[in-house]
Image: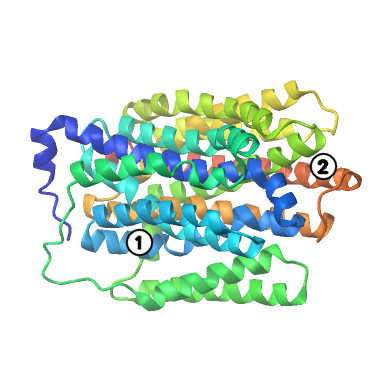
Amino acid sequence: MIAYSDNSFYQENPRARWFVLVSICIALFLVPMSLSSVNMALPAIADALHADAVWLSWIPTATLWGSIVLLLPAGRVADSVGRKPIYVIGVLGFSFASLLVLGVDSVGFLLLVRVLQGLFSSLVFATAMAIIAAVFSGSNRGTALGLTATSVYLGLTCGPLFGGWLTEHLGWRSVFWGPVILAMVALVLAFIYIRNDSNTDKQTHPLDWFGSLLFVVLSTLLLLGLSGLPGLYNWLMLIAGIALLFVFVRQQNRCAFPLVRFNMLAANRVMSRSLMASFMMYAAHYPVLFLLSLYLQYLQGLSPSETGQMILLQALIMACLAPVAGRLSDRFEPRLIATVGCLFFSAGFAVLVFLQADSSLNHVIVALVLLGVGFGLFSTPNNNAALGSVPKERLSIASALLNLSRTGGNMFSMAIIMLLMSLLLGSEQILPERYPDLLIVVRLGFASACAYSFVAAWFSYSRGNVSRQQD
């Protein structure tokens, strides 16, 4: 098991844990910001690289595939060798991949860059929350997790603001290389202040390579199959992916050292329901930036920077509420706070479903306020409940599972959006004569998100009371 003797360092140097938090928050801000800011550059990328609607939808989706396939192996390896080296490799690799954009001359090359960004981002997300949960093992855990949640959602939704400005003034490539300088600050703080947890167990736990490979294959088949329906080959891939999912669960339950023991996970009601709530909420959340970016720029005629400024409203509300919700979840039942957040989130999508090509921008603003309140109330209580339900030596894999539910939900919903784009827009660039079809895609996407968040509310409420487990 992992030794936590390094906690004495933080007890003797209480300021050090806050520098750790700063490093984590910078990384958790930069990575989502880099990923989401690309949405503002999509029209410029389509024009520069001559990308049609389907290729355009692959640009955010390629990163999701890269980030999901390594999450479970990264969490398992971090629990064995320590979280610091995995985290550092993730930040450094993500920065290197971002700089590769300077040589991009085709959509295929850009998709490779996006996949690499996703692969290295999974190392960051598999370890970041676990590092914070271990360093802040006392009463401040909810507050610290709230600040990390603020960083993630600020990054996700501030990305359009910075992405729009960078695209207009420095070109679309700057959306990739611009954040790298600040990433170096996170690396320096990590090297100085993060103390690596060492594996003191003489019996080593090898990585489940077969299970990891199974997970990569099934994730790929599910994504390709779902996004390309109703083609025959896509149906076959989807069926094969579902079959391999059952094989994966069975293999994990029988493996001596699995990536995740599903039968034990199912027995932990708090963790399993928190993961399902997270999956559904992120399935609802991820397409928002993609769909609103296309709607506001194509149908409303806003510039990239104007679009980013509008979407920033949601980020500001989430940033204000996430730490408050974290503190409340240290004192009250997280399920109640998180469930209210799910319902607010549903209301926001219900408003967006009625968008028209000539709708007032106030229509969008009302929806963004509801979405910001909803996700701000949901995210930290849900994470605090999940991480508080597992022992310290399992925090990395619990963190990886939370992020797997996040990226899994993202990938599922983007596959649905890609399917809608393929069916209604096809392999054509988005020109004015196709704007009515684009509006249908946008409204169907928001209707689906409304349904996802209602399901998330049920999972959140049904997990039960968890305050005693956190104590």
Q: Quadrant of residue 38?
A: top right
Q: Quadrant of residue 182?
A: top left
Kind of element beneath mark 2: helix
Question: What residue sits 80% from the left and 32% below the top?
Answer: 300
Q: How is the image coloured?
A: rainbow
Give the x, y percent position of residue 34. 51, 44
Task: Rate crowding at label 2 as few (under 14), some (14 to 19) or many (20 or more) other CA atoms within 10 Å.
Answer: some
Question: In the drawing, does residue 35 fall left or right of residue 454?
Answer: left
**Looking at the image, residue 105 lies above or below residue 130:** below
Task: Rate crowding at label 1 as few (under 14), some (14 to 19) or many (20 or more) other CA atoms within 10 Å.
Answer: many
Which amino acid type is shown beneath numbered disc 2?
Answer: Leu
From the viewer's side, name the closer residue of 428 and 167: 167
Residue on which disc 1 sits: 74
Image quadrant containing the N terminus: bottom left
Question: In the drawing, does residue 221 fall left or right of residue 262?
Answer: right
- Please tell me the numbered disc located at residue 439: 2
Give the x, y percent position of residue 146. 38, 32
Question: In the drawing, does residue 353 fall left or right of residue 2?
Answer: right
Q: CA distance from mark 1 to mark 2?
A: 39 Å
Give the x, y percent position of residue 150. 43, 32
Residue extending farthest top: 362
Question: What residue sits 18% from the left and 71% below the top?
Answer: 204
- Earlier in the chain: of badge 1 and badge 2, it is 1
The answer to the question of whether label 1 and label 2 lie on touching residues, with beta carbons closer than 8 A, is no
Q: Is residue 369 visible?
A: yes
Image quadrant containing the C terminus: top left
Q: Is residue 388 visible?
A: no
Kind of element beneath mark 1: helix
